[in-house]
Image (cartoon, grey):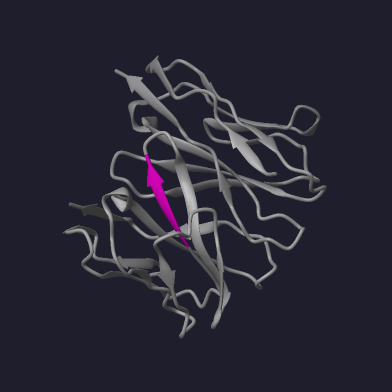
Amino acid sequence: EAQVTQNPRYLITVTGKKLTVTCSQNMNHEYMSWYRQDPGLGLRQIYYSMNVEVTDKGDVPEGYKVSRKEKRNFPLILESPSPNQTSLYFCASKGGTSGGIGELFFGEGSRLTVL
Amino acid sequence: AQKVTQAQTEISVVEKEDVTLDCVYETRDTTYYLFWYKQPPSGELVFLIRRNSFDEQNEISGRYSWNFQKSTSSFNFTITASQVVDSAVYFCALGPSTSGTYKYIFGTGTRLKVLA
């Protein structure tokens, strides 16, 4: 089954404790991205990657890091989480070439709470 | 700058009523794409439709229809004879552009409540 898988789905952590949210897709998609969803703000893009070793900032990259060492994986790293990073996070991938236009396929979401 | 505005924060209708969700976008690109996604209470994001800027034909899929009007920069979504299962948050999105960025810009969403 074609899917985007995120882990963990739920996480409660404390300020400053590094964490990684993993994202993996099995559709051989080149494009992957991370979003956060907050009430009243919709979905905002954090980072995106057009291919292996190619990443770029979205609209809200502060406090986050990403890496794309393999095509299928695109982890989101919070080096020193803060309470304002409490949010619902979505990973997404897109088929076609890097410049191709297509719909995003989303993971199920990861709800992160930073105390 | 690119922007998507969904001015309706929340809409409540009674089952079987028709409802239209508004989406207004801003872009300087001549070629662009618009999308609608549904987020049911379970939380996942479900793709509904993609439309490119060269295709202004309205589209109908069952009870769903979309009205794309380039002249008013709108891409509205109508549900005919709404059902309780239509209760969800609906997001309109723009992008990516042809200017080289690969960002998808989402609106803030409209929460639709369909009452039995």
Q: Is residue A109 magenta?
A: no
Q: Quadrant of the N terminus of chain A?
A: bottom left
Instruction: Please state which of residues A23 and B63 is positioned toward the viewer in this rendering.
Output: A23
Task: In the rendered view, tell whether residue A65 sits above or below residue B43.
Answer: below
Task: In the rendered view, tell whether residue A38 sits above or below residue A65.
Answer: above
Q: Quadrant of residue B9?
A: top left
Please count the marks in the image. 0
Residue that appears at 24% across and 60% down: A9
Position of residue A38 in the picture relative to residue B21 (left or right) = left
Q: Quadrant of residue A23?
A: bottom left
Q: Which residues are magenta?
A: A34-38
Residue that appears at 39% across and 61% down: A63
Residue that appears at 44% across and 79% down: A72
Q: Is residue A37 magenta?
A: yes
Task: In the rendered view, tell whether residue B116 sits above or below residue A104.
Answer: above
- Give residue A3's position: percent from left, percent from top: 40, 67
Position of residue B32 in the picture relative to residue B23 (left or right) = right
Residue that appears at 79% across and 51% down: B31
Instruction: Please state which of residues A8 and B80 is positioned toward the viewer in this rendering.
Output: A8
- Give residue A5's position: percent from left, percent from top: 34, 67
- Give residue B1's position: percent from left, percent from top: 70, 44
- Give residue A96's position: percent from left, percent from top: 63, 70
Task: In the rendered view, tell whether residue A70 sits above or below residue A103.
Answer: below
Q: Main secondary structure of the magenta part?
A: strand
